[in-house]
């Protein structure tokens, strides 16, 4: 039975990199037996301009009906001054919530061809292959109460970090299940020396890990985890943490791989349905110039194939194609090094599609 993928190009460089993902999916459908139907929808600033809302009801309905969602990026300076509840990013948060996507998977995998592009010494990052599992629908981003109010004559902003046992348990089980397919090591990141919510997090993490006796569970405070990421990143296999800490640490880990333009992500529900997107954002400063690196978007397609469609063979094919293109010396500006060939967005996408046949 044909599966449906909803494409949400979004804003900034989103439409450019999405075009390359569509090209890739079409090639997989034409030449490699992928049975899919592609639909498109509006999200973020593009949706605001067309409908006045960052997440139109029609888009949410399409996303709920689809088997998977592939998104470009949302946001831009032209929407920063509008009411907070109607900004592009609120549409993405609402989409994640509306789909019940609670587990965000962000791999930090260093392609050997890009070892010299990392901000750390090659010996520290060569062979890096870690996975950050971030809880996505709880924590301080969604906790209540929140707001800005007048106290003693001045404005005060406040947010609430809150996690239930059930929320912590389900994200820990995702991390442990993934670790069972990797090196069987899980590092849980919290701030249990300061935050009561982290005390509960650590207690539940220990309880869940007891159901996985083959898993080696460790704990780090978030500040130490950040330091360890840049001191000795290869010590990590699977890192699991809450929404806020995961947001920060995953972007830190991104730079270990040479460029944030190389990293895909998956946001999954309890049944394997997912929203797939590169982690780099809308990059409005280079939008429309052909400078965007599409590889994170194309690797997001590989994650879609692996986690929602359970098609390991096609996922591996896409990832091998990216490796071959890097072997050929093609680089977009963000990963360019001496002696390599500069490629624009379309050239890089075409090269990956051509490499699928190898």
Image (cartoon, grey):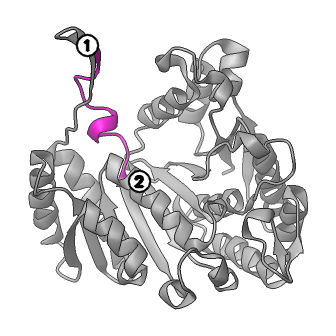
Tally the numbered discs: 2
Horizontal and vertical percent position of residue 269: 41, 47
* Tag 2 residue: 248
Horizontal and vertical percent position of residue 26: 83, 55
Q: The C terminus appears in which quarter of the rendering?
A: bottom right
Horizontal and vertical percent position of residue 84: 48, 19
Image quadrant where residue 144 sits: top left
Q: Relative to 265, is 46 above or below?
A: above
The mark lying in front, picked from 1 and 2, is 1
Q: Secondary structure at mark 2?
A: helix
Q: Secondary structure at mark 1?
A: strand
* In this rendering, position of residue 180 left or right of residue 90: left
* Tag 1 residue: 154
Q: For the point 71% across and 60% down, which residue is it?
A: 298
Question: Is residue 140 within the magenta segment?
Answer: yes
Q: For the point 65% across and 65% down, which residue is it?
A: 262
Tell me if residue 99 can be seen.
Answer: yes
Horizontal and vertical percent position of residue 115: 63, 83
Q: Which residues are magenta?
A: 135-149
Q: For the point 77% across and 56% down, which residue is it?
A: 25
Image quadrant where residue 105 sits: bottom left
Camera-side residue of 66 and 128: 128
* In this rendering, position of residue 51 left or right of residue 289: left
């Amino acid at each position: 039975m044909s599966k449906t993928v909803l494409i949400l190009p979004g804003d900034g460089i989103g439409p450019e990199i999405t075009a390359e993902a569509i090209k890739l999916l079409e090639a997989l459908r034409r030449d490699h037996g992928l049975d899919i139907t592609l639909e498109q929808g509006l999200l973020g600033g593009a949706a605001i301009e067309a409908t006045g809302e960052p997440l139109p009801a029609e888009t949410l309905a399409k996303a709920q009906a689809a088997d998977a969602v592939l998104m470009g990026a949302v946001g831009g300076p032209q929407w920063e001054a509008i009411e907070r509840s109607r900004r592009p990013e609120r549409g993405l948060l609402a989409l994640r919530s509306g789909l019940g996507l609670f587990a965000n998977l962000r791999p930090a995998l260093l392609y050997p061809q890009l070892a010299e592009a990392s901000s750390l010494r090659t010996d520290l990052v060569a062979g890096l292959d870690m996975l950050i599992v971030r809880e996505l629908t709880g924590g301080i981003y969604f906790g209540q109460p929140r707001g800005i109010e007048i106290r003693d004559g001045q404005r005060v902003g406040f947010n609430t970090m809150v996690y239930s046992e059930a929320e912590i348990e389900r994200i820990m089980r995702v991390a442990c299940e993934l670790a069972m397919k990797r090196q069987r090591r899980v590092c849980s990141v919290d701030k249990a020396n300061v935050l009561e919510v982290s005390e509960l997090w650590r207690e539940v993490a220990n309880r869940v890990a007891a159901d996985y006796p083959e898993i080696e569970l460790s704990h780090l405070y978030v500040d130490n985890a950040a330091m360890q990421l840049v001191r000795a990143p290869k010590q990590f296999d699977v890192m699991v943490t809450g929404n806020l800490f995961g947001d920060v640490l995953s972007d830190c880990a991104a730079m270990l791989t040479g460029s944030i333009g190389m990293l895909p992500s998956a946001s999954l529900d309890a049944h394997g349905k997912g929203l797939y997107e590169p982690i780099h954002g809308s990059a409005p400063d280079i939008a429309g110039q052909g400078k965007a690196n599409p590889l994170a978007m194309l690797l997001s397609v590989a994650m879609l194939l692996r986690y929602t469609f359970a098609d390991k063979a096609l996922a591996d094919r896409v990832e091998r194609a990216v490796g071959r293109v890097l072997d050929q010396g093609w680089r977009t500006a963000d990963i360019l090094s001496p002696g390599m060939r500069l490629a624009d967005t379309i050239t890089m996408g075409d090269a990956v599609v051509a490499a699928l046949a190898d």
